[in-house]
Amino acid sequence: MARKKQIIIPIVILAGGVLAMIGFSSMKKPPEEKAEVDNTPIVAVENISVAPLTLEVSSHGIVKPKYETQLVAQVNGQIVELSDTFVRGGFVKKDQLLARIDPSDYQAALIDAQANMASARAALEKEVAQGKVAEREWKQITDTSPTELSLRKPQLAQELARVKAAQAAVLRAERNLERTEIRAPYDAMIDSRDIGLGSFVGVGTKLGHVLGTAIAEVRLPVADNQLQFLVDQGREANVQLNGKFAGQDTQWQAQIARSEGVVDNKSRMSYLVAEINDPYLLAQSSNDVSPLRFGSYVNANIIGINVASAASIPRYLVVDGKVAILDSESKLHFATIDIVRQQGSNVIIGNGLADGDQLIISALDYPIDGMKLALAGEEETPETEELEAKESETQVANNDSGE
């Protein structure tokens, strides 16, 4: 009996342990299944817009007159008359009288020269008559040929020279009399006046400085590598000038008239010269355009070549002449591009991109051509999927209870 108990008791204890273990095991919850994580790289893109583009070259300069003249006295005398418009900032017309030097002495000199010329002409006529008389008398005396001295030809030549000298003296006197009147050489604006009424001036004395108002010029420096973007290196190109007038932003239209043809030895720039007709609007009246004053600082956009299909993208996205594109299958594709020009922080692309291409603008750690990508804003997180599933189950339960 005791021996049976020794055998049964261990078996019972062992069986109880097994049952307890089975019970505890049944109470343990199975591990939750983790959702599969999507490691597809997410990128941001920007749609490419391809369209015709006209390139421009930027420059700047100071507005100056095409013609300017320093007026100086060509005769001596006292200033006896000044025009009211002969003041700084005054506008004058071509040949308008600005000042007058006392003409009295020059009028007297002209009268004296005219009298000398009249005397010389009379002496010439007298000598011509005497020559004819001498020729006639010689024929009555002998049949031989007369000498030039016999016909008084040397005396005739001398009188003829005196007449020419008298004519020259008259012309000189008339010119000096004309020079007593200081007139505008062209339509101009007075830049300065250096004389006053009653001033005595001599030959070479500065009278004033005038600026031609018909045409204004702007010298525009252009880097040598920018000339390639201009048609015919900028000759006859249209230019848009931007500046200030009365505190307002204003634009003027100009045209390249010429190139100076040399490279400046200091700035290493080439210079194009733009011209503006009638900058002060004296020949026309327009309320839409403001006058362009001499001395104004202006920025210039020189109109250049046309690119048939061009796109502008940030410069930092270009690596070894290629850019990253998200293709229609949401895969990475490296497109080889043709850079036409670098413009600030962007580059102008001529070939390699099409309208509507999706340019990847976000950084990728290890980009590989053909790798699968996800577009930012379109991916779904596991939490989002679980929430959508619960909402779907709730909707189904509500439908069942309603039935």
Image: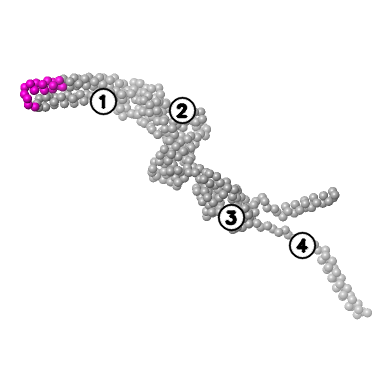
Q: Circle 2 sits on which residue?
A: 284
Q: Could you say which quadrant of the image residue 87 lies in?
A: top left
Q: Circle 3 sits on which residue?
A: 333
Crowding at mark 4 (Cα within 10 Å: few <14, some 14-19, many 20+)? few
Q: Is residue 142 magenta?
A: yes
Q: Which mark is residue 31?
A: 4
Local secondary structure at mark 2: loop
Local secondary structure at mark 4: loop
Is 329 on the left-hand or right-hand side of 347? right
Q: Position of residue 124 (x, y in %)?
A: 17, 22
In this view, the mark in front (4 or 1)? 1
In this view, the mark in front (4 or 2)? 2
**Earlier residue among tags 1 and 3:** 1
Is 3 on the left-hand or right-hand side of 398? right
Query: Which residue is painted at 7% across and 21% down in the image?
Result: 140
**Earlier residue among tags 4 and 3:** 4
Q: Is residue 331 magenta?
A: no
